[in-house]
């Protein structure tokens, strides 16, 4: 003869549901504190229109490679890609996958579109605008002005150009460190419109 099922009091059900809800909230809190999954992309993320030279790049956000695609016609293989129109840099690995992308503040003298290589690296110096800079990666010269990537030591954005020709392409400090680690002497640099 089957044993009749015991019916739990209603307070037991409420207690069980409450405990389950607390476990779910705790799990979601832990996941939120860890941040988004590294391969997650923002829904509906679109590349922005060309940023102006005085617009401040986001120091904390480096979109996933899929959020801002590497420009067509930027070559192949391991390289640094710099878009004049987007004021943006991509660090592209040997498999043609962008590992990092970020916006930059260009100088007053732009390099011509084309292919270059990193010719000289300098740990730190003072820029032509008097700002202490680091992670300097030279790759071109135009009209007697050396053109290089760098970041301000204090992480600040450059002041508005004072009329002097400058070839420094500045970026936030974290992006400057990433570019420094990626851009050894001889690394290909592709400048595109």
Image (cartoon, rainbow, N blue to C red):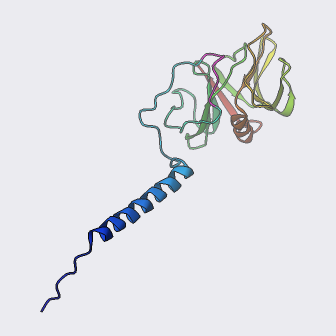
Q: Position of residue 176 (x, y in %)?
A: 72, 34
Outermost residue, left side: 1
Outermost residue, top side: 163
51 or 109: which is nearer to us?
51
Q: Is 112 contained in the magenta span?
A: no
**Magenta-tinted stretch:** 52-58
Residue at the (36%, 67%) spot, across then down: 15
Residue at the (51%, 19%) spot, across then down: 49
Location of residue 47 with respect to 97 vertically, above or below: above
Q: Position of residue 66 (x, y in %)?
A: 49, 37
Specify whether 3 is left or right of 9.
left
Specify whether 143 is left or right of 67.
right
Residue at the (46%, 54%) spot, across then down: 28
Q: Quadrant of residue 148?
A: top right
Q: Main secondary structure of the magenta part?
A: loop
Q: Position of residue 105 (x, y in %)?
A: 68, 22
175 or 143: which is nearer to us?
175
28 or 120: which is nearer to us?
28
Q: Quadrant of the C terminus?
A: top right
Q: Position of residue 111 (x, y in %)?
A: 70, 18
Q: Quadrant of residue 139?
A: top right
Residue at the (82%, 13%) spot, across then down: 144
Q: Is 55 contained in the magenta span?
A: yes
Outermost residue, bottom side: 1
Specify whether 59 is left or right of 44.
right
70 or 74: which is nearer to us?
70
């Amino acid at each position: 003869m089957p044993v009749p099922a015991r019916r739990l009091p209603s307070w037991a059900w409420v207690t069980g549901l409450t405990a389950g809800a607390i476990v779910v909230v705790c799990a979601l809190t832990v996941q939120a504190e860890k941040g988004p999954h590294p391969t997650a992309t923002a829904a509906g993320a679109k590349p922005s229109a060309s940023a102006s030279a005085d617009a401040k790049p986001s120091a904390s956000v480096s979109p996933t490679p899929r959020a801002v695609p590497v420009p067509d016609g930027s070559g192949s293989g391991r390289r640094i890609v710099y878009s004049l129109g987007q004021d943006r840099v991509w660090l592209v690995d040997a498999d043609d996958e962008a590992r990092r992308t970020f916006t930059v503040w260009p100088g007053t003298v732009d390099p011509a579109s084309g292919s270059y290589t990193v010719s000289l690296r300098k740990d730190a110096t003072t820029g032509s605008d008097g700002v202490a800079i680091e992670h300097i990666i030279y790759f071109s010269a135009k009209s007697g002005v050396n053109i290089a990537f760098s970041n301000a030591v204090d992480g600040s954005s450059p002041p508005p150009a004072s009329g002097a020709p400058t070839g420094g392409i500045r970026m936030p400090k974290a992006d400057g460190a990433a570019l420094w680690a990626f851009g050894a002497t001889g690394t290909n640099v592709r400048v595109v419109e």
